[in-house]
């Protein structure tokens, strides 16, 4: 089966990426996805789907690890339980789309993105947990923004699926920020700004391998 997930010409002119995203998300991220990454994605549709599946699986794993580690926080338990279920459902849906389109699922090495953020984690809680939650918010927000950037170029089936993801990922980023702010009575705006700046650097600097969260082509 031939694979043609995306068209270089816009398939849906009715909604732009800006229209699909909540204003809070625009304000949160320091930069939009560069056009160079979008063109890279259009040239690598199979890798995009495979890495998307891996990202959903990793997101569920992160939520589960928080569930196990922080059993004394009822709101965190509730939010992460819901998030883990949703991410696993998304994983199943992506794998189903891959099977339908003849895309074989195989291992891909991770991008530098998540590790590039996590290398700045502080050592002890609650500071470490605050950092983990801020990073979670950034990963969800960037995923949401990239889905929105891709939607106008996707076929109808994939565009419809990604629109549903924009809604859920947008909610996830807000949940992560809510939980991060809950960990301390002190403001965490400076810490958020630090990670937002690091995330923007990762988005706009060269990468040698295409991934869903890679920077621009080297």
Image (tube, rainbow, N blue to C red):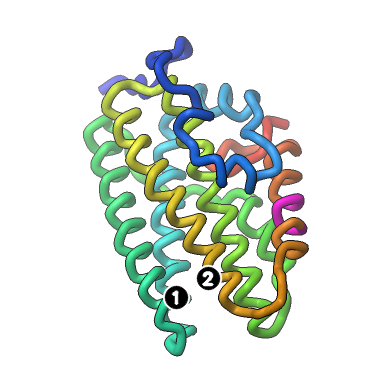
Identify the magenta region. Answer: 194-198
Quarter of the image for the N terminus: give it.
top left
Element marked by disc 2? helix
Residue depicted at 27% across the width and 32% down the height:
102
Q: Which mark is residue 76?
A: 1
Q: Quadrant of residue 76?
A: bottom left
Residue at x 47%, y 62% (from the top left corner):
175
Task: Give the distance between the C-alpha atoms of the residues marked 1 and 2, in whole angstroms.
Answer: 7 Å
In this rendering, is residue 58 above or below 50?
Answer: below
- Between residue 50 and residue 7, name the one nearer to us: 7
Query: Crowding at label 1, few (<14), some or many (≥20) Cα neighbours within 10 Å?
Result: many
Q: Residue at x 63, y 73 (%)?
A: 130
Tell me if 204 is positioned left or right of 18 in this view: right
- For the stretch drawn in magenta, the main secondary structure is helix
56 with respect to 94 (left or right): right
Which sits in the foreground, 202 or 144? 144
Does the magenta run of residues contain 49? no
- Judged left or right of residue 12, residue 177 is right
Q: Earlier in the sequence, mark 1 or mark 2?
A: 1
Total numbered badges shown on the rendered structure: 2
**Are the residues at dot 1 and dot 2 in contact (C-beta closer than 8 Å)?**
yes
| Residue where numbered disc 2 is placed | 179
């Amino acid at each position: 089966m031939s694979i043609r997930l995306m068209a270089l010409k816009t398939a849906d002119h009715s909604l732009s990426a800006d229209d699909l995203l909540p204003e809070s998300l625009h304000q949160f991220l320091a930069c939009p996805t560069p056009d160079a990454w979008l063109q890279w994605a259009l040239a690598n549709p199979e890798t995009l789907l495979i890495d998307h599946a891996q990202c959903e699986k990793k997101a569920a794993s992160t939520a589960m690890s928080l569930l196990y580690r922080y059993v004394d926080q009822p709101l965190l338990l509730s939010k992460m339980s819901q998030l883990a279920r949703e991410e696993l459902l998304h994983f199943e849906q992506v794998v189903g789309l891959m099977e339908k389109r003849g895309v074989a699922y195989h291992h891909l090495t991770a991008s530098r993105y998540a590790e590039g953020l996590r290398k700045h984690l502080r050592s002890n809680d609650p500071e470490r947990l605050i950092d983990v939650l801020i990073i979670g918010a950034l990963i969800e927000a960037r995923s949401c923004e990239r889905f929105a950037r891709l939607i106008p170029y996707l076929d109808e089936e994939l565009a419809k699926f990604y629109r549903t993801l924009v809604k859920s990922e947008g909610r996830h980023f807000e949940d992560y920020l809510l939980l991060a702010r809950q960990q301390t009575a002190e403001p965490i705006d400076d810490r958020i700004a630090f990670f937002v700046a690091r995330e923007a650097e990762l988005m706009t600097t060269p990468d040698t391998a295409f991934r869903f969260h890679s920077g621009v082509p080297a």
